Amino acid sequence: MLAQSPAGGRRVIPFFAARRELAAHGEHWMALAAEALADGRPLQGEAVGAFEAELAEACGRRHAVAVGSGTDALFFALTTLGVGPGDEVLVPALSFVASATCVVRAGATPVFADVDERLLLDLDAARHAVGPRTRAVLAVELYGQMLDPHALEAFAARHGLALVEDAAQAPGARAAGRPAGSVGAISCLSFDPTKTLSAPGSGGAALTDDDALATRLRRLRWHGRGEDGRIAELGYNSQLPTAAAAVLRDKLRRDAAWSERRRAIAAAYDAALPGLPEAPGTVHARSKYVARVHDRDALRTRLERAGVPTAVHYPVPLHREPLLAERGRSTPCPRAEQAAREVVSLPIHAFLTDAEVEQVLAAIRA
């Protein structure tokens, strides 16, 4: 889980962008939401389909299926791919808890593998974690950075595994010329309020190129209802509200500019802190700025006193969480455990001012 410091002192920098986003664009978004609701359909209105089409195009996919949360998107992806009781799913040991609880929710067993120097799934460690019951691999694009999509897909094919891309933190990222959301059988996004592409509330999406997978994803999100209106299977109620879709369409069009601003801020931070290494040929979405420091708590205390809030993504490796230790299995994960003791996140969003960025840098230098 995320651990965040209560920043103290004067001129506290906002860790998240929500209030400033609303101040800058709220009136426009309210008008868009009202216009979208005019068709009388607060769920499954025209704005949802329009957003899905634009999102699929942005991610280079044939289909985008909007759902109620990124967590639901992950669960639906595994279920649609046939993952269930008796199966195992490879998961990186460092991530948000939903990357693993979706596996438990599907009735399968998460198998935790170590991370590499960028804190992404280490494919060599994952290779050693593959067993006779391994059915899928869930690749998390942590902090907004992508693994090599060709290496990931080759790994999955070599071991006969379904590949699910957890791109919740990565909209706007690219690797090997491909955008986040384009990798594997199904890709999953989150529109949680803490994400760079955030809904007014919650939301998520599953993306795929497979027509049959897309059809089943749509059934699962709406009570198992088929195209003929009849209930074809046990489904769920996980729909993106029409008003939220209207706002997300507008945010999607602004996302490129917002991503560039975050990357500029990250470049300034890189000069002052040991940030994570960036792979050649990749474009980092910079949804989070994460550094590694040996005396993390001391740094957080000093920054807090200077009005700079921080967070830890994530202080407990997944295989050390009580529920997941009980329901999953793990290979040795020393790099994930060390990173959990050292990582610290600084404020990074498109609504930080140059003066606030300098305030962060001055606090670090001091």
Image (cartoon, rainbow, N blue to C red):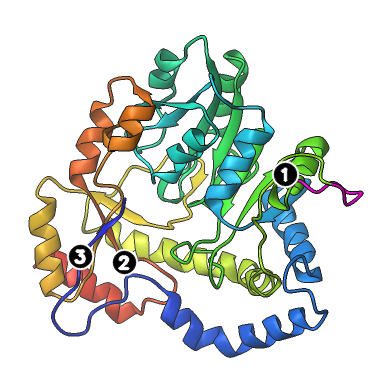
Mark 3 Cα shell of 10 Å, populated few (<14), some (14-19), many (≥20): some
The residue indicated by pointer 2 is 347
**Residue 57, horizontal then vertical, whole percent:** 74, 54
Disc sitting over residue 217 in the figure: 1
- Disc 3 marks which amino acid? Ser
Q: Tell me if residue 364 is in the magenta stretch.
A: no
Left or right position of 162 against 109: right
The boundaries of the magenta stretch are 224-230
In magenta segment, residue 225:
yes
Q: Is residue 356 above or below residue 341?
A: below
Checking the image for residue 361, the label placed there is: none
Say which label, 2 or 3, has the lower sequence index.
Answer: 3
Residue placed at 59% from the left, 14% from the top?
158
| Distance between mark 2 and mark 1 Cα atoms | 35 Å
Q: In the rendered structure, which disc, 3 or 1, sits on the residue that comes first in sequence?
A: 3
The residues bearing labels 2 and 3 have C-alpha atoms spaced at a distance of 12 Å
Res 183 visible: no
* Residue 14 horizontal/vertical position (percent): 31, 76
Is residue 202 shown above or below 314? below
Secondary structure, mark 3, is loop
Residue 183 is drawn in which quadrant? top right
Tell which residue pokes out farthest to the bottom in this image.
27
Task: Pick the residue in front: 338 or 46.
Answer: 46
| C-alpha gap between disc 3 and disc 1 | 38 Å
User: Residue 59, image x and y in percent?
Assistant: 67, 50
Task: Check disc 3 and report the residue beneath it.
Answer: 5
Identify the image quadrant of residue 346.
bottom left
